[in-house]
Image (tube, grey):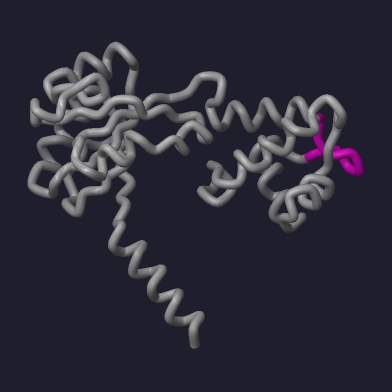
Amino acid sequence: MISKATLGRLPIYLKYLRSVNGSVTEISATTLSRGLNLGEVQVRKDLAAVCGSGRPKIGYKTKELIQSIENILSEKEPKEAVIIGAGKLGMALLDYTGFSEYGLRVIKAFDIDPTKCNEDVLPMNELHSYCLMHQIELGILAVKPESAQEAVNEMVKSGIRAIWSFSSQTPEVPQGVIVQYENLALSLAHLHNRMKNEAI
């Protein structure tokens, strides 16, 4: 399994490799680290996780390394995720364009409030059919705490197997469903704590 930190650096590697592809047929971790101003040991570990060990004193074939990173980032076959909850947070996530760097598309949200529905926000009762039609397995939970369990139940019924939750409520999920929780308040508190410590 590739670490979150390594995954975060892959789009940077990919952009650089594409810029030199054609002029450089083989590239080493040393060359890549210098080109990106990153630590060589870190780059070497990242590339080993992505493509295995490079050849001694030569490194990696540029095209093969690009293909390996593209496969991990699902660039050729982007995975679609849906948002449950079209409030301020849900709509902000729907408008965010950075998901594409990691081979993800988020183009639809679902909500129980019919006044919020439009071309991009569909009624909650269409979630099941949409997920089946588009083979959706990823979902983003952005609803109020009191609605979290009911929303998760509908997501699971619709075939969603991985949930990125922004809810302060911890819903129950069946075995085989992965939930990753994001606590925005905790992240801000952590940043505030770092600021205080670095000011000392």
Q: Is residue 31 above or below residue 175?
A: below
Residue 130 image-quadrant placement: top left
Over which residues does the magenta segment extend?
54-61
Q: Is residue 29 above or below residue 27?
A: below
Determine the residue located farthest toward the right in the rendered image.
57
Q: Is residue 41 visible?
A: no
Residue 185 image-quadrant placement: bottom left
Look at 80% across and 33% down and name the residue there: 20
Q: Main secondary structure of the magenta part?
A: loop
Q: Name the side, left or right, on which 180 lies relative to 98.
A: left
56 magenta-colored? yes
Residue nearest the viewer, comparing 184 with 177 = 184
Q: Where's residue 53, x and y in %? A: 76, 40
Q: Where's residue 197, x and y in %? A: 46, 81
Q: Is residue 128 visible?
A: yes
Q: Name the side, left or right, on which 143 lies relative to 61.
A: left
Q: How many marks?
A: 0
Look at 89% across and 39% down and name the residue there: 58
Look at 15% across and 35% down and name the residue there: 151
Residue nearest the viewer, comparing 134 with 2 = 134
154 magenta-colored? no
Q: Name the side, left or right, on which 158 lies relative to 199.
A: left
Determine the residue located farthest toward the top in the rendered image.
133
Residue 173 image-quadrant placement: top left
Q: Where's residue 79, x and y in %? A: 43, 25
Q: Where's residue 70, x and y in %? A: 61, 28
Look at 22% across and 34% down and name the residue there: 84
